[in-house]
Image (cartoon, grey):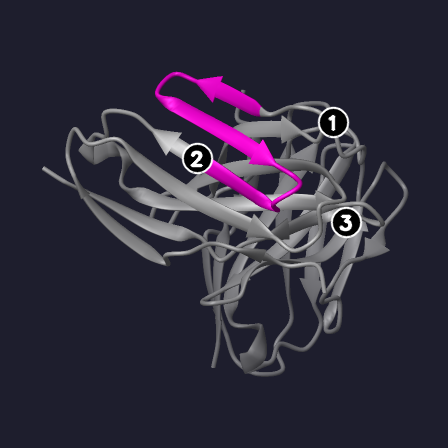
Amino acid sequence: KQEVTQIPAALSVPEGENLVLNCSFTDSAIYNLQWFRQDPGKGLTSLLLIQSSQREQTSGRLNASLDKSSGRSTLYIAASQPGDSATYLCAVIYFGNEKLTFGTGTRLTIIP
Amino acid sequence: NAGVTQTPKFQVLKTGQSMTLQCAQDMNHNSMYWYRQDPGMGLRLIYYSASEGTTDKGEVPNGYNVSRLNKREFSLRLESAAPSQTSVYFCASSEALDRAYEQYFGPGTRLTVT
């Protein structure tokens, strides 16, 4: 079964630290992977989209990497700020199922 | 640009009642989607529309119907609401169904069925 897993479900980090969020997928045959942010009671905001031919994407303090062979993606957040507190979701489009398959997210809390 | 808008933001229904969730996008996107989000289960696709005039079932279509009214608008209808349909519903759009394109999400509708 094609699944997406995000561990841990929750993470607390002191302000200013660099951190890594993890995403695992069960099949290396993917078209792309997308990272989203969701604030409490809000919709999803797209952060980064990595095509299957790419190894990483960067936007400001965020860097997402993709390793298809190991079925893993990481979202690196540099110099964390309280405003980074949110739930981060990763989603994958698998070959043969051209719709987003979502993980259940990591709830990140940045401690001032 | 407003992006993707959804109405209503909140709704409480009694079992057996019907309602329509509205979604509109102003990005001239061809493809639109309806998801539901439940605790511990992530987002699951209910229906999608690759382009104006077409709709297709997603992972969890039972109990729902959709209408792609025009290129901008995509509505989701619950004909006879059940407590199992208590969830947060998100509409999304993308430039095309092609997997190269990002999806953009609305703010969600929080539905409770009692």
Mark 1 → mark 3, Cα distance in angstroms: 13 Å
| Location of residue B35 (image quadrant) | bottom right
Q: Chain of mark 1?
A: B
User: On the image, numbered disc 2 is attached to which residue?
Assistant: A75
Mark 2 → mark 1, Cα distance in angstroms: 25 Å
- Does the magenta run of residues contain A62? yes
Crowding around mark 2 (Cα neighbors within 10 Å: few <14, some 14 to 19, many 20+) is: many
Crowding around mark 3 (Cα neighbors within 10 Å: few <14, some 14 to 19, many 20+) is: many
Q: Chain of mark 2?
A: A
Q: Disc 1 marks which amino acid? A: Glu
User: On the image, numbered disc 3 is attached to which residue?
Assistant: B48
The picture places residue A9, in percent across and down from the top left corner, at 37, 58
* Disc 2 + disc 1, Cβ < 8 Å: no
The residue sitting at 27% across, 41% down in the picture is A85
User: On the image, numbered disc 1 is attached to which residue?
Assistant: B95
For mark 3, give the secondary structure.
Answer: strand
The residue sitting at 53% across, 28% down in the picture is A48
